[in-house]
Structures are given as structure tokens and as C-alpha cells.
Image (cartoon, rainbow, N blue to C red):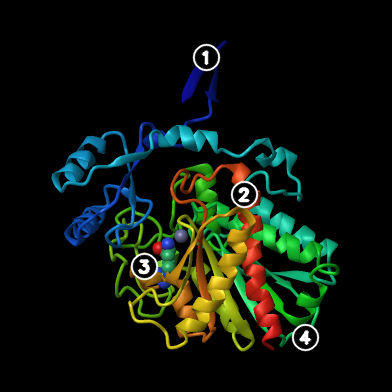
Amino acid sequence: MKVLLVLCGLVLVVSARPDPHPHLKGAQVLRVVPEETWQVGYLRALQQQDLYDFWTEPNSVGRPVDMMSDVFQLPVLRAALENVNLSPRVLVSDVASLVAGSTPHQHNNKDSFSTRIDWTDYYDYDQITGWLDSLATDYPSVCKTEDVGTTYEGRTMKLITIGTGAADNPGIFIDGGIHAREWISPATVTYMINELVTKGSGEFSELLSKVNFYVMPSINPDGYQYTWTNDRLWRKTRSDTDSSFGCKGVDPNRNWGFHWNEVGASSSPCSDIYAGPEPFSEVEMQVVRDQVNRFAPTLQAYLTFHSYSQLWMYPWGFTSDLPDDWQDMDNLAQNAVTALTSLYGTRYEIGSSTNTIYAAAGGSDDWVKGVAGVKYAYTVELRDTGSYGFLLPTNQIIPTAEETFEGVKVVADFIMNNN
Ligand code: ARG
Ligand code: ZN
């Protein structure tokens, strides 16, 4: 909103803070649970129209599908659902007010820049990387940070290596924030970094002497920052291609070069699941790929954190077939989830990603296992199951991070003891 003030011939333009989310006013999230296969097919066709934002994707009978619609399209969506005997439940009655209620606090303004973070709030990209570097300065015997690449918009991407033993100790690679709006992911990954580093010469000294962690807490920085400044519910990267009709961004978790774009992805640049013009078109995914390759000879586990749905998944995502060693992945996932659940009772489902949610090719997990050859490759969908979805309140950050770390420690201990 701009207000023109003309004072004694002096023209001042005073900008009040514009509403960054005008399209979310009155927008709702509706949930339907398909009971017949043809209804699932209908929902998939609806998704192809790119009129609604599917917070969860149609997969199978019995699995809820959450769709966000703007206020104008809402009656159309309701009518379409009712036509096929799907009665929607209102999951979020006003997305705008939920966004407003989960907007981070004052410390996120540049004047009061501090390298300290805690887990009572969310932090923007510069604050996360500033904190990461300060951690490396404070704990040089346990960790180090490196600049490993530059994003499409020019941001620096950082990797933190945590470990006190040999460089060829078994390694675990962890990333967060591949999807921009899934804020709980970088928050959880930074929490785990903090635990490992600050307790690196105490509780975790044995672990760090035997296992190396390679961690990138925010691997889609342009998208993440865009969720802070322009659109809280942005998912993709922010790149532009000649043929993109003004639509920006690629789904970074459809962009990896293994069975790329075969299933569960779109060739339309305006789609939220756009696979990109070619595999690894996104510079950020090239950077992560190169880091995985760099450590691949020692890597035994890979963990990539998303939200939401509470799922601990393993490959494949491009087919319903299972890898030969799926039982090893399943067993370790069971143990991890048992530990996770024991803390606060949070329930998770376990399985291959195709069989648990939907087939979607071009995910990082499939590439890391199928091409880089890392045995234990997991995609973890954090809290919740839809009450808040991507807009998880800040008071759930610490419990989410704590319980997740319980699961991750099980994986890490297994890697440590198995070698
Ligand atoms: N929600 C994630 C996504 O849609 C799940 C990815 C699971 N892995 C896979 N290769 N499909 O990107
Ligand atoms: Zn995701």
C-alpha cells in the first residue's frame, strides 16, 4: 500500500508493509479420503490442472489428500469433489490467519543480527548460515564448515562436517530444506547439528571419533528465502528457463538424474512437481550431488528431511518394486521409529516411498541409493499429520527435533557398531 504525501512541494512516498500473501486470504485446505480407486484417479486429474495446491498428493484408497484452494476457486473445487462423492473436511479454514499466526518473531530483522539461534522460533537463510559458521569457529576440533556452491540467485551454500576421527571413517550425509515451505526440516537439522557439535567431546565423543557427519541444513536457499519474503507456501527452486511462460522454479526432489521424470512428476514449468528441463538442471541439486559423490566411498547412510505426514521411507520412489536389500532398510527404520515414538508417542509409518505415499521419480533418495550406492537412504517426513501441515507452530520445533534425533541416533549407532 503506497501513500502519497505532498508537503510543501516535497513528494514523499510512504510504503506501509504490504500484505505478502493476498492470495491466501480466505484460502482453505480441504481434506478428502478417497474410498475407491477411480476417485484417486480423479484427484490426480484434478492435480494436473494446476489450479490447487496439493499439500499431500493423491496416492491410494484410504490415504488423505489435502488441497489448498484460493477463495475464488473454492466453490468450484467443492462442486468438483461432491460430483465424485467425495465429501471434504475443512482442515485449515483460513490459511492467511494461520500464516500470520506462525510468522517468526522480531529477532529476524537485520538490525539485530545475531549469530545465535535457538529452537523456539524459525530462522531465515542468512541466520542459519551465520550460526553455522559461528559454530565452526567455536568448536574447531569437532567440526568445520565449507562453502560448496552458489545458488541460482547467488547465495552461498554451506556444508558442515562433524567428526573427530579419520576422514575415511564411515559417513552419514544429512540434508534439509529441499522443499522451501517445509520449515520444520532445516529447524530439525540445525538442532541435530547443534547436539552433535556441542556435545561432541562429551556424550557424542565416541560416535564422532568413529563416524563422520556431512550436513547441509538448507539445500534450497533461494526457495526458502522466498517463503520468508513473498510466499510462505512456495515449494520449488527459483530458477527461470526460456520456455517457462513466466513460471519459476523446479521441484528439486524431481530433478535428480535417476529414472528422471518417469512418473509422479510434471513437464509443465508451472506445476509444483515440475521435474525441470533436464536432470540436474538445478544448480543447487548439482552442488548436493557433487558433495554426495565426494564422500560416497565412505557413506553408509543418507537422510533427507521433509514435512509433513510422519513417514520414515526408503527407496524406491520410481517403482513399486523393492530394492534387494529392502529388509535391511526396513529393520533399521523400525528401530529408528521405535526410538522416535518412545519420546512423545508420535506415530510414524514405515515403507518404500512408492508403496507408502506415491510413485515419484527424480527424488534425491533414489539417486543416492541407485547411483551413489549408499545403502541406507531415507526420506523422513516430519510432523504433523495435517492439523497445521507446513505451518507447524514454533512450540512444536523442539519436540519434533528431539524425537527425530532419537531416531537418527539409532541409525548413527548402527553405522558405528557395524564397522
Ligand atoms: N514428499 C516427498 C516428495 O514428494 C516424498 C519423496 C519420496 N521419495 C521419492 N523418491 N519419491 O518429494
Ligand atoms: Zn518435501
The residue depicted at 15 percent of the width and 48 percent of the height is 84
Instruction: Kindly identify the amino acid type of the residue bearing the numbered disc 4.
Output: Ala
Residue under label 2, please give it. 397
Q: Are marks 4 and 2 in contact (CB under 8 Å)?
A: no
For numbered disc 4, what is the local secondary structure? loop
Instruction: Kindly identify the amino acid type of the residue bearing the numbered disc 3.
Output: Gly
Residue 346 in the image: state x and y as whole percent: 55, 55
Q: Of the two numbered discs 1 and 3 on the same chain, state the one appearing first in sequence.
A: 1
The residue depicted at 52 percent of the width and 87 percent of the height is 373
Residue under label 3, please give it. 276
How much space separates mark 3 and mark 2, taking CA atoms? 32 Å
For numbered disc 1, what is the local secondary structure? strand
- Please state which of the two labelled residues, at mark 1 or mark 3, is closer to the viewer: 3
Residue under label 1, please give it. 6
How much space separates mark 3 and mark 4, taking CA atoms? 38 Å
Q: Are marks 1 and 2 in contact (CB under 8 Å)?
A: no
